[in-house]
């Protein structure tokens, strides 16, 4: 039986084909009625035509699916091109190198991450190097970003890899001054450091063994301006150690000693002089006479931090300047003073005599940690300054007592508006004891 013309010529552009006998046949089948002979013949013909029609539709669907798949591929390619060219034309891509360097500098120094720590994979140095190849090339080739390096504690089996990384950092820093933080030392590490010791500007040493290795030899530290020593226990001290390297530091200006007193005073014996402008000895037990002597031997000292303790079991060692003849009064141009003062009552009057002779007319900022305000020497240092701008008091035995009248008299000499706040330990100054021009933080 031949197929109807309408089935053969049907295409996707034509409207759906409507079978005029579909309803009649559907009713007969639904009612289980007996189909006439003619209706059965027509049903057979329509069945064949419907199968042909379905086959043609399936072919069209297959071709449409293929075209749709190609369209999806083209769409993904277009999206990739849009992302690529959008990134390439982004404003950050058009930033000149000097502007990018300023961005890198702000990222490093604003969050105190300027020191490179190889062990920390999330450090700012690692993160900035992962953005793109262009940023990485610029960041790695800028010497100033690789001038601070921290040699932390690592496993000995990883020391070779770490030393290789440190050598890369030294090469990236070029000839720029270096800031070095040392927590470990080894023969291999010393071999990597020696060629660059002459470029070290800031040196922070943690542990007496490292002090002994670095400062006990005649290494070239001619560029060193700041020396920081921490974490030196009493048991590990070699009291006969000669700190030969101290003689090779002509530019040293800032000394920070957070260590046991005897080696600290040994360093001071060798290096106090007119070149020192900053000195921090907050963890070194001293007596007032030693503090006054230090100031006398360092006439250009601008910033000083001292820990005075006497009459307790804490050892206060002697040094070669203990019987040094001091002028009376001693006038010094110290501008920033951080003083912790702990003296037994039986010693207080004698020790105060040592501080009374000290006059600081240029003192601007003072941080005082006292047992009680009635420390004549400490009070004299404050009241003798005519330019004091900031006074930070921590007085453990003051409790609810009002501030002494000497501060009220002194408050008219340029001190700024007070900040009334709780003492972080357990005492605070009552608000009624504060005048409007007295600074107590």
Image (cartoon, rainbow, N blue to C red):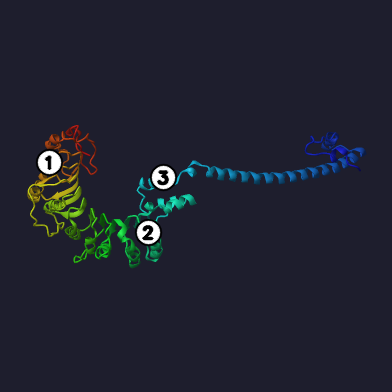
The local crowd at label 1, few if under 14, some if 14 to 19, many if 20 or more residues have their Cα within 10 Å, is some
- Quarter holding the N terminus is top right
Query: What element does badge 1 sit on?
Result: loop
Most foreground residue, 397 or 215: 215
Answer whether labels 1 and 3 touch (C-beta < 8 Å). Answer: no
Where on the picture, by quarter, is residue 266? bottom left
Query: What element does badge 3 sit on?
Result: helix
Most foreground residue, 309 or 187: 187
Q: How many marks?
A: 3
Percent position of residue 394, x then y? 19, 43
Percent position of residue 56, x then y? 80, 43
Task: Evaluate whether residue 122 shows in this view.
Answer: no
Tag in front: 1 or 3: 3
- The residue where tag 3 is placed is 103
**Residue most toward the bottom?**
187
- The residue where tag 2 is placed is 170
Real-space CA distance between mark 1 and mark 2, rounded to the nearest whole angstrom: 49 Å
């Amino acid at each position: 039986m031949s197929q109807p013309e309408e089935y053969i010529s049907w295409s996707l552009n034509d409207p759906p084909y409507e079978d005029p006998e579909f309803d009649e046949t559907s009713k007969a089948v639904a009612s289980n009625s007996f189909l006439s002979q003619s209706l059965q013949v027509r049903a057979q013909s329509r069945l064949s035509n419907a199968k042909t029609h379905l086959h043609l539709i399936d072919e069209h669907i297959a071709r449409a699916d293929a075209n749709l798949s190609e369209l999806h591929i083209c769409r993904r390619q277009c999206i990739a091109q849009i992302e690529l060219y959008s990134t390439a034309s982004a404003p950050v891509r058009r930033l000149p190198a000097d502007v990018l360097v300023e961005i890198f500098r702000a990222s490093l120094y604003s969050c105190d991450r300027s020191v490179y720590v190889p062990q920390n994979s999330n450090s700012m140095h690692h993160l900035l190097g992962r953005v793109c190849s262009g940023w990485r090339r610029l960041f790695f080739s800028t010497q100033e970003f690789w001038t601070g390096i921290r040699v932390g504690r690592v496993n000995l089996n990883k020391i070779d890899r770490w030393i290789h990384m440190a050598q890369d950092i030294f090469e990236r820093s070029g000839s720029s001054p270096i800031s070095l933080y040392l927590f470990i030392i080894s023969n291999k590490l010393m071999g990597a450091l020696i060629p660059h010791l002459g470029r070290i500007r800031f040196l922070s040493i943690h542990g007496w063994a490292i002090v002994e290795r670095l400062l006990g030899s005649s290494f070239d530290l001619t560029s060193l301006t700041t020396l920081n020593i921490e974490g030196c226990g009493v048991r590990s001290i070699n009291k006969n150690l000669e700190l030969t390297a101290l003689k090779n530091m002509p530019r040293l200006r800032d000394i920070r000693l957070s260590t046991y007193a005897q080696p600290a005073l040994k360093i001071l014996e060798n290096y106090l002089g007119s070149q020192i402008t900053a000195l921090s000895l907050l963890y070194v037990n001293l007596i007032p006479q030693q503090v006054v002597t230090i100031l006398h031997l360092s006439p250009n000292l601008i910033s000083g931090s001292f820990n005075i303790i006497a009459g307790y079991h804490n050892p206060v060692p002697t040094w070669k300047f203990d019987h040094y003849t001091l002028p009376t009064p001693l006038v010094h141009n110290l501008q920033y003073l951080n003083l912790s003062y702990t003296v037994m009552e039986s010693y207080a009057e004698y020790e105060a005599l040592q501080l009374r002779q000290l006059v600081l007319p240029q003192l601007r900022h003072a941080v005082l940690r006292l047992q009680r305000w009635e420390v004549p020497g400490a009070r004299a240092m404050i009241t003798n300054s005519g330019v004091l701008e900031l006074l930070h008091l921590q007085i453990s035995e003051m409790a609810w007592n009002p501030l002494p009248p000497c501060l009220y008299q002194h408050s008219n000499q340029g001190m700024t508006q007070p900040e009334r706040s709780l003492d972080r330990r357990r005492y605070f100054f009552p608000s009624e004891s504060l005048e409007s021009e007295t600074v107590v933080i």
